[in-house]
Amino acid sequence: MANSSRQLAGVLSGRKRKSYRLSIDGEECDIPQAALRILKDLLVQLSLGNSVTLMPIHAELTTREAADLLSVSHPYLVESRKAGKIPFHKAGSHRRIGLVKTVEFLRRRREFL
């Protein structure tokens, strides 16, 4: 994985293009430059032994998922939610927190600490 990420970094550092032609087992397709940059970053993280999760920006998390993402306890997140520190909404009887709001909360916590 580390070698693959280095190879992609080399390709991406050259001539700037909107997309690149990728060939896998004789099949070719065009890959946007942004997608290759993401793939390179994923390969770097995986080669370092880090876990990687991809989520759409509009994803909604359960309070448990948000607590795990923030590396805080579930009770701490629930108290933060009750104190109005992180917005949520209800989906049926369950509370959901937007991924964007969760990341904003994380940034505020890091600035405070």
Image: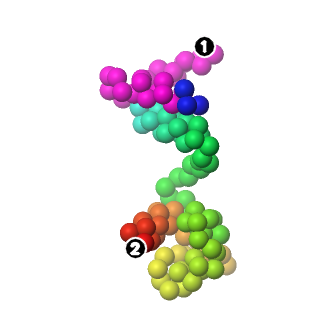
Residue 71 visible in the snapshot:
yes
| Residue 109 vertical position relative to residue 9 in the rendered view, above or below | below
Say which residue label 2 marks: 112
Residue at 63% in and 74% down:
73
Q: Identity of the amino acid at label 2?
A: Phe
Residue situated in front as seen by the camera: 69 or 58: 69
Q: Position of residue 8 (x, y in %)?
A: 47, 27
Does the magenta segment cover residue 8? yes
Q: Secondary structure at mark 2?
A: helix
Q: Quadrant of the N terminus?
A: top right
Specify few, some or many for label 2: CA neighbours under 10 Å numbering under 14, 14-19, or 20 or more. Answer: few
The amino acid at mark 1 is Gly
Whether 89 is drawn above or below 12: the answer is below
Of labels 1 and 2, earlier in sequence is 1
Residue highlighted by disc 1: 26
Q: Which residues are magenta?
A: 4-31
Residue 55 position, x and y percent, is 56, 52
Q: How many marks?
A: 2
Viewer-nearest residue: 70 or 112:
112
Q: Name the foreground residue: 93 vs 53.
A: 53
Q: Residue at x 50, y 58 (%)?
A: 58
Question: Which-is-in-front pick, marks 1 and 2?
Answer: 2
Where residue 2 sits, quadrant-wise, is top right
> Is 4 left, or right, of 10 in this rendering?
right
Query: From the viewer's perspective, is residue 17 above or below residue 38?
Result: above
